[in-house]
Image (cartoon, grey):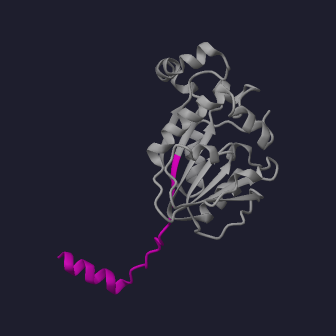
């Protein structure tokens, strides 16, 4: 089971971890567009996934749960490390343009409150990119997998959870079909496994990539029409 920062770091130093990061990062860069002056919050163990994304002149906030921990050497001119409580983020309202969450939500003790905090700190029309484990996959059950430490999800559950917490789901993409085994044969033929897996065992992908947008509700209250208003409308129709 993966419980702290060092365990995640060790996994991503293995060949299996490098391949997982490659596939997820390759898809992320199709959706993440960062502009000068943007702010992005990286939650869980997601900071490494920005390596394939252009990050010039942006501010990165590496946000780690206290139970996972962090690493001081991550600090640089573009990033700030924050050790936080999941249910009460030390970030101002509407502050972040983007949120990237990997190995975070499935380990949350209160998923609803955590998502509401994401909604609070995101700017209007801000986007979140979330990786969640598929509960049907071996990645969600293998002790060697970093996606086995928390809850797994179905695609239907993901849509409902995000809808209930005021997010508009733009994409939910299935990723990672090769098994969580650090064998040379599998890793050498990972593209083959991805291709046949997406066809023959489509519903057993390892993770979901969710691209969501903060939804702003407008007031829908309507003034009830008086009797005189109704009479005027009838006359116009006539």
Among the 4 quarters of the image, the one containing residue 16? top right
Residue at x 62% of width, y 31% of height: 18
Q: Is residue 147 above or below residue 62?
A: above
Between 224 and 53, the one lying in front of the other is 53
Q: Residue furthest bottom?
A: 228
Magenta stretch? Answer: 211-238
Q: Is residue 148 at all visible to an observer of this figure?
A: no
Q: Is residue 218 left or right of residue 91?
A: left
Q: Is residue 98 above or below residue 201?
A: below
Q: Residue furthest left?
A: 238
Q: Residue furthest top?
A: 185
Residue at x 59% of width, y 19% of height: 187
Q: Position of residue 69 (x, y in %)?
A: 80, 49
Q: Position of residue 10 (x, y in %)?
A: 74, 34
Q: For the N terminus, give its image quadrant.
A: top right
Q: Is residue 23 above or below residue 83?
A: above
Q: Is residue 111 at all visible to an observer of this figure?
A: yes
Residue at x 43% of width, y 79% of height: 223
Q: Is residue 89 magenta?
A: no
Q: Is residue 19 left or right of residue 89?
A: left
Among the 4 quarters of the image, the one containing residue 20? top right
Q: Position of residue 71 (x, y in %)?
A: 76, 49
Q: Is residue 199 left or right of residue 1?
A: left
Q: Position of residue 131 (x, y in %)?
A: 60, 42
Residue at x 17% of width, y 76% of height: 238
Q: How many marks?
A: 0
Q: Is residue 159 left or right of residue 81?
A: left
Between 82 and 72, the one lying in front of the other is 72
């Amino acid at each position: 089971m993966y419980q702290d920062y060092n365990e995640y770091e060790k996994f991503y130093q293995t060949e299996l971890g490098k391949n997982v990061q490659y596939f997820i990062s390759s898809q992320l860069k199709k959706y993440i567009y960062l502009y000068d002056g943007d702010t992005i919050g990286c939650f869980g163990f997601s900071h490494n996934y920005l390596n394939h994304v252009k990050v010039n002149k942006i501010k990165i906030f590496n946000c780690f749960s206290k139970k996972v921990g962090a690493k001081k050497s991550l600090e640089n001119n573009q990033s700030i490390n924050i050790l936080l409580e999941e249910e009460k983020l030390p970030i101002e309202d509407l502050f972040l343009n983007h949120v990237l969450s990997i190995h975070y939500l499935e380990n949350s003790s209160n998923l609803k409150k955590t998502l509401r905090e994401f909604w609070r700190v995101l700017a209007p029309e801000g986007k979140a990119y979330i990786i969640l484990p598929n509960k049907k996959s071996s990645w969600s059950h293998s002790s060697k997998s970093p996606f086995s430490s928390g809850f797994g999800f179905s695609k239907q559950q993901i849509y409902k959870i995000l809808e209930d917490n005021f997010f508009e789901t733009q994409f939910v993409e299935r990723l990672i079909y090769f098994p969580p085994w650090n064998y040379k044969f599998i890793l050498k033929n990972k593209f083959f496994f991805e291709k046949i897996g997406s066809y023959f065992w489509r519903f057993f992908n390892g993770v979901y990539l969710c691209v969501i947008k903060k939804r702003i509700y407008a007031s829908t209250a309507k003034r009830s029409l008086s009797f005189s208003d109704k009479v005027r409308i009838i006359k116009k129709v006539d």
